[in-house]
Amino acid sequence: MSQYQEAANTPTPPSRYQRPSLFACIVVVVFLGLLTKGVMATDVTLARLASGAVNLVDFVGRALPPKLDDLDVIGGAMLETLYIAIVGVTAGVVLSVPFAFLAARNTAPHSLIRIGTRFLIASMRTIPDLVWALIFVATVGLGPLAGVLAIVMDTVGFAARFFSERIEEVHPGPAEALASTGAGRLSVIGGAILPETLASMTATSLYSVEKALRSAVTLGLVGAGGIGVELSAAMRLFNYNKALTIILVILVCVLIFEQLSSAIRRRVI
Amino acid sequence: MANIQIQNVHKSFNDIHVLRGIDLAIPTGECVILLGANGCGKSTLMRCLNGLTYPEQGSVVVGDQDMAKTRGRRLRRQRQRIGVVFQHFNLVDNVSVFQNVLYGALGQQPGGLATTLQALAPQSLRQRAMQCLDRVGLADQATQPCRELSGGQQQRVAIARTLLQAPDVLIADEPVASLDPRAGRAVMELLIDIVRERGMTVLCSLHQLELASEYGDRVVGMKAGRIELDAPRHELDRDTMAGLYQGVVRVDEQQPTPADTALAYSA
Ligand SMILES: Nc1ncnc2c1ncn2[C@@H]1O[C@H](COP(=O)(O)OP(=O)(O)OP(=O)(O)O)[C@@H](O)[C@H]1O
Ligand SMILES: [Mg+2]
């Protein structure tokens, strides 16, 4: 210890605390302002929360016991939801692969194509799935096809972005080595880049399936097929006992599905 | 067969003038070792020879083609004749050793990737790939994933890949720099044997001076983007070689720093 004190010209360590930057201060002030304003604007009051809680208890009371007569109809609708998710995700993932290669910096044939593809992917992602469903209900009509198309859009927006980020992380060396032998662009992508990204793409795809199943449930609320249609009908007719059954079926199915998918995902990575 | 004619080559990255007028001729079948300190421009020069980068000025003729002006389909055809071995091997980690060797034929096989995949490649190609792998002593490892091999073994796989490519010219950028002295010497030995068997024209950069005079027909030294030394192997002496590493050696430095000077005196 004494040897440190003796060295008179030891450089001093940096101070323990750093003054926050001006930028950080501005961010905090703006955030706090929006938060207070938001609480007032959305009318979050204790009284309303309390009465909501009372109503919730009332709803549960009226929904109990769940009505089990329509289980076959509900099961059929749940199966339709599952089909919407699977078909939509498969088409979405297949489409995502070329989109991702066109959008990644190291594989895009031209920077204009890359920017265009990125913009397309970003719009698919930023427009929410329910909005897509509304658009497709208007264009292809009520029913599961609208749901499938909405899932396709949502999946491409999500998966193509993750795929392309993963592609950009691939070490450039192997691709360069294959190019140096005279290989064409597609051979380099297929030979060097695809093998390095396949595992991560599979994991992302499985996660997309889980995500799609959850959104396929809600898509029915706007008429795009599946169990959501049944749920919204039951709620509108105040048939709370049936609604509760539907919610329980959704809960069980989604849970089983998530467990299954994450078990597979763990084995892939 | 091909000879190499590099004339007045200049190349800059941003503000850094990396190659400052390089002239170098290598006759067919000669093995030239390239020496020089870190950052003197060796890799940049070698990359110009395969169209992995392009000079702003000058010509880089390999055989009958100027690599400085070759693009597209003609570049791909020309690249088949110019093999490259990299310091970090640049194998595809997630596929088998055998598949990596097969990739050496990517440029030549009609059908490209489809006909070089392990499952789809024609039997004659598979046979040749196996011979190449056997030549580097790794026939037993054919089905192993590349990432499980040692560095020395990985560089052998890269050499087998180049062997299947069967180029006239071999560019080797510090092929043994990531290997320990023994593995490095063994790989160097193998590489030189192969290029002699095939009569390839070689440009190979190294950081080990003792290997340079042992394996090269001729040694070329670079310093700060210029060629400072060019001598047949029997005319080399240690002092001229050591001179390549003293004073301003990098292309991105102006004055020697005190540390450099100290190093130069201690050397
Ligand atoms: N793609 C690039 N972009 C920008 N600068 C580059 C690029 N490639 C090389 N340089 C710069 O060119 C200079 C020479 O690099 P080069 O790799 O040719 O040296 P080298 O002689 O191969 O060195 P080493 O022995 O470390 O491999 C370095 O200063 C490097 O920063
Ligand atoms: Mg280098």
Image: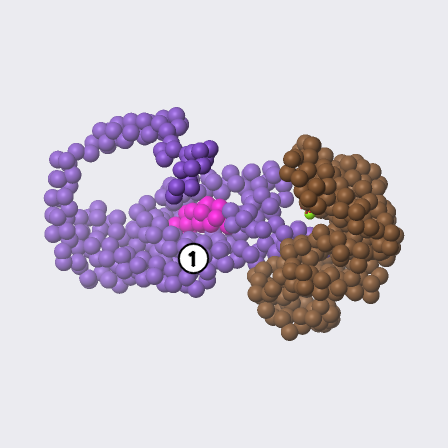
**What's the chain of the residue with tag 1?**
A
Q: Which residues are magenta?
A: A147-163
Please check the rendered image and state whether residue B7 is part of the magenta-colored stretch, yes or no.
no
Q: Residue at x 68, y 67 (%)?
A: B121
Q: Which residue is mark 1?
A: A206
Give the prevailing secondary structure in the magenta stretch: helix
Instruction: Using residue A235 as the reference point, say whether residue A153 is left or right of it.
Output: right
Instruction: Using residue B144 as the reference point, say whether residue B190 is left or right of it.
Output: right
Q: Is residue B169 visible?
A: no
Q: In the displayed orientation, state which residue is furthest to the bottom.
A: B140
Q: Which residue is at the front of the view, B229 or A128?
A: B229
Element type at marker 1? helix
Instruction: Using residue A166 as the reference point, say whether residue A141 is left or right of it.
Output: left
Please check the rendered image and state whether residue A155 is part of the magenta-colored stretch, yes or no.
yes
Q: Residue at x 73, y 70 (%)?
A: B135
Q: Is residue B137 visible?
A: yes
The colour chain B appears in is brown
Relative to A236, does residue B167 appear above or below in the rendering?
Answer: below
The image position of residue A99, as x and y in percent, is 54, 47
The image position of residue B225, as x and y in percent, is 75, 39
Instruction: Using residue A230 as the reference point, say whether residue B32 is left or right of it.
Output: right
The chain whose colour is purple is A
Q: Which residue is at the front of the view, A43 or A263?
A: A263
Q: Which residue is at the front of the view, B207 or B69?
A: B207
